[in-house]
């Protein structure tokens, strides 16, 4: 089966399972989404959603975040992974938004990636989910599933993103990103996975070559 045909069939399954996949990180605007996504690195979405209400109550805008002491930000997010680094980055990111972008989150990939603590994946999520601009953020889970399904042999998330953009139509990228995340959590875990029972791996996973008889 060609990759495009396989991707189309996978897309049909994902659309049936998750017709309107919700954004898993609680937010109310582009800034709070940006903060939540930045916090989510090496941390579960559930943990991020536990700390952001208190954080956003104190700092719902770039101006308010920039005005907080780094120690206060750290106290509010201390239970997430890499909290000291994230606290430092959040204050610096907010200050840059105020100083260089008029206190607004820019709808521009290059500008987003220039912010402290914001990498390509975070910028892609914000472009897609805050501004509706087609993007295909790839995290380690999507990278893993794309390889399992034979859609990409990319050695890193950058190569996998390129491959997935080729096989899925541009107008599906935003929901496919979310659908694959949910599918990975509910049907296709990293450990203890039984491919034969998986709605997608059972037919999409490349078959291992058989050993030649001696």
Image: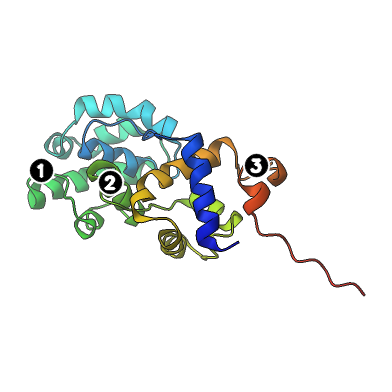
Q: Earlier in the sequence, mark 3 or mark 1?
A: 1
- According to the picture, the residue beneath numbered tag 1 turns out to be 103
Q: Is residue 14 above or below residue 53?
A: below
Distance between mark 3 and mark 1 Cα atoms: 46 Å
1 vs 2, front mark: 2
Give the image location of residue 155, x and y in percent. 52, 66
- State the residue at coordinates (75%, 66%): 209
Distance between mark 2 and mark 3 Cα atoms: 30 Å
Give the number of the disc on residue 198: 3
Element at label 1:
loop
Q: Are marks 1 and 2 in contact (CB under 8 Å)?
A: no
Please rate how many residues cluster around mark 2, counting C-alpha atoms within 10 Å: few if below 14, some from 14 to 19, many from 20. many
User: Which quarter of the picture shows residue 213?
Assistant: bottom right
Q: Residue 79 or 9: which is nearer the viewer?
A: 9
Q: Are marks 2 and 3 in contact (CB under 8 Å)?
A: no
Q: Residue 23 or 174: which is nearer the viewer?
A: 174
Distance between mark 1 and mark 2 Cα atoms: 16 Å
Please rate how many residues cluster around mark 3, counting C-alpha atoms within 10 Å: few if below 14, some from 14 to 19, many from 20. some
Give the number of the disc on residue 207: none
Give the image location of residue 157, x and y in percent. 45, 59
161 left or right of 118?
Answer: right
Give the number of the disc on residue 126: 2
Element at label 3:
loop
Q: Is residue 170 above or below residue 27?
A: below
Q: Are marks 3 and 1 in contact (CB under 8 Å)?
A: no
Asked if one can make out residue 186 in the rendered structure from this viewpoint, the answer is yes
Give the image location of residue 164, x and y in percent. 45, 59
Please rate how many residues cluster around mark 1, counting C-alpha atoms within 10 Å: few if below 14, some from 14 to 19, many from 20. some
Give the image location of residue 5, x and y in percent. 53, 58
- State the residue at coordinates (42%, 46%): 176
């Amino acid at each position: 089966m060609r990759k495009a045909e396989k991707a189309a069939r996978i897309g049909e399954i994902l659309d049936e399972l998750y017709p309107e996949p919700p954004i898993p990180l609680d937010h109310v605007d582009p800034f709070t989404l940006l903060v939540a996504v930045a916090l989510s690195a090496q941390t579960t979405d559930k943990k991020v959603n536990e700390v952001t209400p208190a954080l956003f109550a104190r700092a719902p805008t770039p101006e308010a975040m920039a005005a907080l002491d780094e120690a206060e930000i750290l106290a509010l997010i201390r239970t997430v992974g890499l909290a000291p680094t994230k606290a430092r980055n959040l204050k610096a990111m907010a200050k840059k938004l105020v100083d260089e972008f008029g206190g607004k989150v820019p709808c521009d990939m290059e500008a987003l990636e220039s912010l402290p603590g914001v990498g390509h994946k975070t910028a892609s999520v914000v472009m897609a989910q805050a501004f509706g601009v087609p993007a295909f953020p790839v995290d380690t889970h999507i990278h893993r599933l794309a390889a399992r399904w034979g859609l990409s042999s990319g050695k890193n998330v950058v190569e996998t993103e390129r491959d997935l953009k080729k096989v899925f139509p541009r107008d599906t990228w935003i929901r496919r990103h979310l659908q694959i995340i949910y599918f990975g959590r509910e049907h296709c875990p990293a450990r203890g996975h039984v491919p034969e029972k998986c709605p997608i791996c059972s037919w999409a996973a490349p078959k291992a070559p058989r050993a030649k008889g001696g």
